[in-house]
Image (cartoon, rainbow, N blue to C red):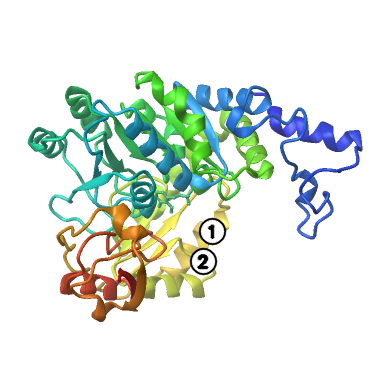
Amino acid sequence: MKTPIHTFVTHYLESGLSRLHMPGHKGRGMLGCEVRDITEIAGADALYAASGIVAESEKNAAALFGAGATFYAAEGSSQCVRAMLYLAMVNRADPAARPVALAARNAHKSLLYAAALCDFDVEWLFPEGEGSLCACPVAPAALAARLDAMVVKPFCAFVTSPDYLGGMQDVRGLSAVCRRHGVPLIVDNAHGAYLRFLPESLHPMDLGADMCCDSAHKTLPVLNGGAYLHVSRAADPRFIEGAKAALELFGSTSPSWLILQSLDLCNARLAGDYPAEIARTVGQVGALKRRLSDRGFEILDGEPMKLTLRGDGLQLAEDLRRGGVECEYADKEHAVLMFAPDNPDSDFNRIDAALRVPRPLRGTPAPALPRPARAMNVRQAVFAPWEEVRAEEAVGRVCAAPTASCPPAVPVAVSGETVTAEVVKALRYYGIDRLRVCK
Ligand SMILES: Cc1ncc(COP(=O)(O)O)c(C=O)c1O
């Protein structure tokens, strides 16, 4: 597969032209990567008005992902989440009605920022059964019942799959429900770009989602910030027509050409041996999970490239760190490790060695997910004058900024909702001491 963006930059470097353009490092910075860090010069195309090498590279990505169209983002899934919600909102069936998104409660905070910027309401889908801040399983029947009950049809249903702990939604079932109700399904697939390249794809584009975003940088060999917004062939064609404008609305006018080259090169790798490498790594992770489970560790079910250990995650993370391993995320109940084909065998050996002997590591279960009342809409709360107070002092006040520990960046306190004693308990559990409340 051709890599037009990377090839263009290579030719530009070979041309020896003097750089009388941005960036100011002139290709000679201290990191070493500056030489390839160019900007929208002649021939380099323009990310948000792509008709040349960027458009060609994005077409390659769309073919690889089986999408109707794929658009690059240099500012992560955060940018794509906002763009997808904006697209669904402006193209909603009833433009006269106040827009509302129906979203699973474990949404990343970028959803609330989108609600603030675009001025829509959010109705939550709460987890069924054993849910937590990070996990929010939604059964198709529950979604159907909720959609039937809503007086104003939402402009989208929004789910996160995989979630931070590796939990997967039944995207196929949820998309069938959404189709029947005429509601677009948006999937935050930030953690699942690689799912397309499993022997049997589990990618949202193959399971019926209308749009999804993938943080390429989270699970593929791509620089931090590189992401895709995919629109399916079956989706409303206005989503494809409007996607660039939507991404531009939330993006910088100086997107990183290093990130775009990285996304471009990734195409060649995905078209080559990478799917086979993923299959090999999935086998290694599966074997590691079995070994740890045999030793008495509790492993959460979920996507095949994550290892989620249940127990005192902070202690597990410390044990791993002592053994030379830094994990992705740890809280009082879980430790999450993310794998990719570029993890050498020695990484697996280190984990094995660090977790040789199971320790009785009981986690501290998270308090029940609070469901406080909404006092004002998200935009009003985010744009209201605010002050920062200690969590305990916030009881009875209205939350201004979405309050989340990062990771997993799922808001514990939601903008516009009244802070209750239960919210404070949850904030404390996640180690959050202070929050912004409306004045
Ligand atoms: C579920 C989820 N969605 C969206 C994002 C935002 O992705 P990015 O960091 O690529 O902007 C994250 C980031 O961690 C995430 O976990």
Q: Is residue 321 above or below residue 43?
A: below
Q: Which residue is located at x 64 percent, y 23 percent?
A: 1
Label 2: how many Cα within 10 Å (few below 14, some 14–19, many 20+):
some
Query: Within 8 Å: ligand 1 and the Cβ of disc 2?
Result: no
Q: Which residue is mark 1?
A: 347
* Sequence order check, earlier mark of 1 and 2: 2
Q: Are marks 1 and 2 in contact (CB under 8 Å)?
A: yes
Helix, strand or loop for disc 1:
helix
| Residue 192 visible in this rendered orientation of the protein | no
Q: Amino acid at mark 2?
A: Val
Q: Which residue is mark 2?
A: 325
Residue 180 in percent (x, y) is at: 17, 23
Helix, strand or loop for disc 2:
loop
Image quadrant assignment for residue 380 = bottom left
Answer with left or right where residue 251 lies relative to residue 36.
left
Q: Quadrant of the C terminus?
A: bottom left
| Residue 402 visible in this rendered orientation of the protein | yes
Q: CA gap, disc 1 to disc 2? A: 8 Å
Q: Which residue is located at x 38 percent, y 71 percent?
A: 316
Image quadrant assignment for residue 206 = top left
Residue 155 in percent (x, y) is at: 26, 33
Name the front one of labels 1 and 2: 2
Q: Amino acid at mark 1?
A: Asp
Image quadrant assignment for residue 314 = bottom left
Q: Is residue 71 above or below residue 217?
A: above
Answer with left or right where residue 204 lies relative to residue 149.
right
Residue 67 in percent (x, y) is at: 44, 24
